[in-house]
Image: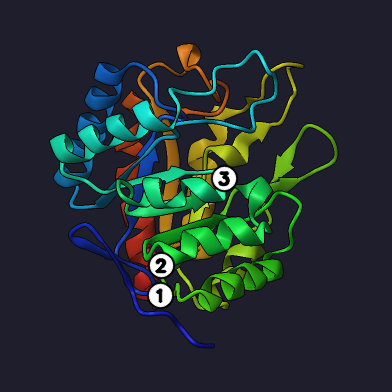
Amino acid sequence: MNVAEPIVLGDHKVGRGQPLYIIAGPCVLEDPDEMLETATALASICARLDVGYCFKASYRKDNRTSSDSYRGPGIDDGLRLLDRIKDAVGVPVVTDFHHPEEADAVAEVAEVLQIPAFLCRQTSLLEAAGRTGRVVNVKKGQFLAAEGMGQAAGKLRQVGCDRILFTERGSFFGYGDLTVDFRSIQIMRELGHPVVFDATHSVQSPGSTGTTTGGTPRLIPLLARCGMAAGCDLVFLEVHPEPSRAKSDAGSQLPLEAFEPLVTEMIKFRNLYLEAND
């Protein structure tokens, strides 16, 4: 197995044998002041715990269940807000994009370009992300076996991108539910790239309320522990000051007040894993 070199994000390295790294933030950009306050709070907690941190939020959600659902501020206002947060808080940012022609604009702001799970096989999207020179985080489709991520990596490497992250975010389990096959983390690690575990999308029940996606957020800590034990290198958490009023994924975001206790626990799991394995 060829293992990729650790990836540098901000002042930290991520990958095999490296300390825990956190990607966290609200699902979608909302009120600018609240987004800045949330990013500041998350970054402060991670700095206090000496954990690497990258702010995450979407400028546009093209995969909402209903056409009436909030989709975000759009690319222009969204990227301006992400740039403002990056400069004010001093952390790297990650955001997802859905159209190849937006890759270059996104790369001017985001250190990490994220490929949505439903689009992980879209060659033109992967190639556009790979050509920017940025880190690319590919979320494994809910429909895809872990081995299939090797093809996504191959498409990226063909255009010169070797700074690749894979994210496990659950697999379809019948209609309206997800489950996590933790074997996927090991299988994707064997492909040689750092693996992220998304502990919040993994608790979703897609479309379960009819026009929105529900979830069981009380299970986020449990799945996070399992992901750490399985060997993920980074953890992805959607976090909101008050999930019940979040404009997207209200049923699966972690309350801000629960973030520090969970990260504190995950640090212990990561350190124990490194002592035993890497």
Front position among marks 3 and 2: 3
Residue at horizontal 64%, vertical 33%?
63
Which colouring convention does the figure follow? rainbow
Q: Quadrant of the N terminus?
A: bottom right
In this view, the residue farthest toward the bottom is 1
Q: Which residue has dot 1 on it?
A: 276
* Position of 98 relative to 275 (above/below): above
Residue at horizontal 57%, vertical 77%?
191
x%, y% of residue 246? 47, 17
Which badge, 3 or 2, comes first in the chain's sequence? 3
Which badge, 3 or 1, comes first in the chain's sequence? 3
Amino acid on which disc 1 is placed: Ala
Front position among marks 3 and 1: 3
Q: Which residue has dot 3 on it?
A: 99
Asked if the residue at tag 1 contacts the one at tag 2, i.e. Cβ–Cβ closer than 8 Å, the answer is yes
Amino acid on which disc 2 is placed: Tyr
